[in-house]
Every structure is written in structure tokens, then in C-alpha cells.
Image: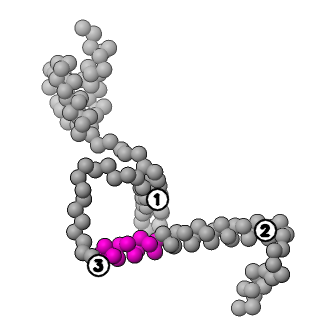
Amino acid sequence: MNRSSDPLADLISQPFSHPYLARIDPTLLKTLNEQQLAILDEVLETLTPKRAPKLVDLRLTVDVIISRFYIVLLVGKDQRKTMRSYLGTNFTRTLNIFIAALLLIGLNLSISAFFILTAYLIKSALGIDLFAFHLKDIVAKF
């Protein structure tokens, strides 16, 4: 039987194709038959965590002079089979809801301010006057 045409036999020739297979001694791996390789492959596929699709997958790296930080924002459906136990009190739950509301309001205000200022700059660049006063006149008074 030509073992190179069988995809399971390719696991033997490429011991580092799967992180768990790399830990098995190659001589022991060569002694496995097709059925054992099929079962081993099925078990390893079950044990290997799968990436769930995310609605938002934002990963940023911030370089500071002395260190490097990363920011990760993931939004997706919770696909765990068991419910998470939440050990917080009513105070922490209320505080979490309050902070989440503040973050959403802050995000909304930031996006709104960006769009309003962008529209104002475009209006000014085109020379369109909607009002008798300008923002620079108001700022100059202070």
C-alpha cells in the first residue's frame, strides 16, 4: 500500500504539522496503523480549540518609548456550553452597567464630534456660510 497517497499517513512524515503530534516520538508515530492514526487525528481535532467568528476583531499595538502595549476588542456570540459563574455583588453589577453605559455614551459623543467637525471643515473649505458667525470668531472672544 502506498502510504504517501493517504492523508493520515502524511501525519507520520510531517510530525510537526500538529502541535500535539510534535510531542510524540517519531519512531512510535511510525508504528501506528491507519485506524490508530484516524482515531488520533479525530481526538486531536476535538481537543484543538476552534476560533469562533467575531463581529468585531480589532487588534492594535501601541508602542511607547519604554514599553509596548496591545489593545484587543472582540465582539461575538458567546458559544460556551456552560454558563459563567458571576461572583459579583449587586454593587459590582450596577457599577459594571454604569461604566458600560458611560463608555457607550463616550464612544457615541466621540464619533458624533468627529463627524460634526469633519462636516464643518468641509463646509469651511468649500466657503459655504450657514450662519452669520464662525467658530473662530467665537473662540477668539475667549
Query: Where's the N terminus, which quadrant?
Result: top left
Mark 2 lies on residue: 123
18 versus 141 height, above or below: above
Residue 57 position in % (x across, y down): 45, 52
Label at residue 16: none
Instruction: Identify the amino acid type marked 3.
Output: Phe
The residue drawn where x is 43% and y is 68% is: 66
Label at residue 61: 1
Residue reaching furthest to the top: 1
The answer to which of marks 3 and 1 sits earlier in the sequence is 1
Residue in the foreground of this view, choosing between 108 and 134: 108
The residue drawn where x is 29% and y is 78% is: 91
Label at residue 91: 3
Instruction: Tell me the element at label 2.
Output: helix
How many numbered callouts? 3
- Compared across the picture, whether 112 is left or right of 78 comes to right
